[in-house]
Image: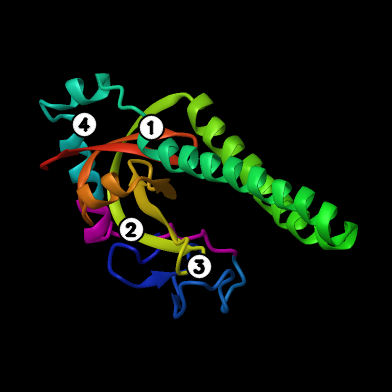
């Protein structure tokens, strides 16, 4: 007894009656339970085919072995934090020095303001030291990746502005991550670039571009 899949129509496996709907579980004439139809397998999208093909070409590229042996420095990421630490030390020394002077000349109450400002600088100092140390301690990993996007974030005021650079990468398994990077790396990559991403924790320390 045919189920109708060969002719494009679905028929009851027991009585042969036509079944109008593919999602019907029981024959409306004899009540026999019908076998489930296999779910159609969706065709892969052109984007998925392009993703697989490009990463396959990247994995087979002649330059890949040399790129996987590179060990780029993380100083491009750490250097701004070192500058921030130096600024924080100077800031703390100056503000606490002002607090001592204010205490001697204007009383203890006036000394509280520079001490408060100094504490803010001290917190910035600790944050910069911890984040920089985290990047340096993280192991260097190398991943095949495609550049999806990049952006910048400007923090601080007009006289102390600090630009932070981010790059979003897509990896071979389809995962995507936004990573902090240096201005040099951000300026060297462009959207849709393929290559090897050199990572330290959540930081992109370099990107080895490959034409595929």
Which is closer to the viewer, label 3 or label 1?
3
Instruction: From the top left corner, tell me how far across and down residue 80 is, in percent.
Output: 43, 43
From the image, tell me which residue sits under label 1. Answer: 75
Which is closer to the viewer, label 3 or label 2?
3
For mark 3, does the 10 Å Cα neighbourhood hold few (<14), some (14 to 19), or many (20 or more) residues?
few
Q: CA distance from mark 4 to mark 1?
A: 28 Å
Of residues 111 and 58, the one nearer the viewer is 111
- Quarter occupied by the N terminus: bottom left
Which residues are the magenta region?
33-50
Instruction: From the top left corner, tell me how far across and down residue 161 is, in percent.
Output: 45, 62
Q: Residue placed at 62% from the left, 42% from the top? A: 125
For mark 2, does the 10 Å Cα neighbourhood hold few (<14), some (14 to 19), or many (20 or more) residues?
some
| Cβ atoms at labels 4 and 1 below 8 Å apart | no
- Sequence-wise, the earlier of marks 3 and 2 is 2
Can residue 2 be seen by looking at this rendering? no
Q: Name the dominant secondary structure of the magenta segment.
A: loop
Secondary structure beneath dot 1 equals helix
Residue 157 shows which numbered tag? 3
Q: Left of 64 or right of it: where is 198?
A: right
Secondary structure beneath dot 4 equals helix
Q: Residue placed at 35% from the left, 45% from the top? A: 182
Residue 67 occupies quadrant: top left
Q: Left of 132 or right of it: where is 127?
A: right
From the image, tell me which residue sits under label 2. Answer: 150
């Amino acid at each position: 007894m045919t189920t109708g899949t060969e002719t494009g129509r679905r028929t009851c496996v027991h009585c042969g009656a036509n079944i109008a709907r593919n999602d019907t579980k029981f024959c409306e004439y004899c009540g026999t339970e019908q076998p489930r139809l296999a779910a159609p397998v969706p065709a892969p999208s052109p984007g998925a085919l392009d993703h697989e093909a490009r990463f396959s070409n990247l994995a087979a590229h002649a330059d890949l072995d040399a790129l996987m042996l590179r060990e780029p420095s993380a100083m491009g990421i750490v250097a701004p934090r070192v500058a921030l630490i130096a600024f924080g030390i100077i800031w703390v020394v100056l503000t606490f020095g002002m607090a001592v002077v204010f205490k001697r000349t204007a009383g203890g109450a006036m000394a509280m303001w520079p001490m408060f400002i100094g504490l803010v600088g001290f917190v910035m100092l600790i944050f910069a030291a911890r984040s920089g140390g985290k990047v340096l301690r993280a192991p260097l990993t190398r991943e095949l990746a495609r550049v999806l996007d990049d952006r910048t974030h400007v923090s601080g005021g007009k006289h102390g502005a600090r630009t932070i650079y981010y790059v979003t990468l897509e990896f071979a398994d389809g995962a995507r991550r936004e990573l902090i990077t240096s201005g040099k790396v951000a300026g060297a990559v462009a959207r849709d670039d393929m290559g090897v991403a050199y990572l330290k924790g959540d930081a992109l320390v370099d990107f080895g571009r490959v034409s595929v």
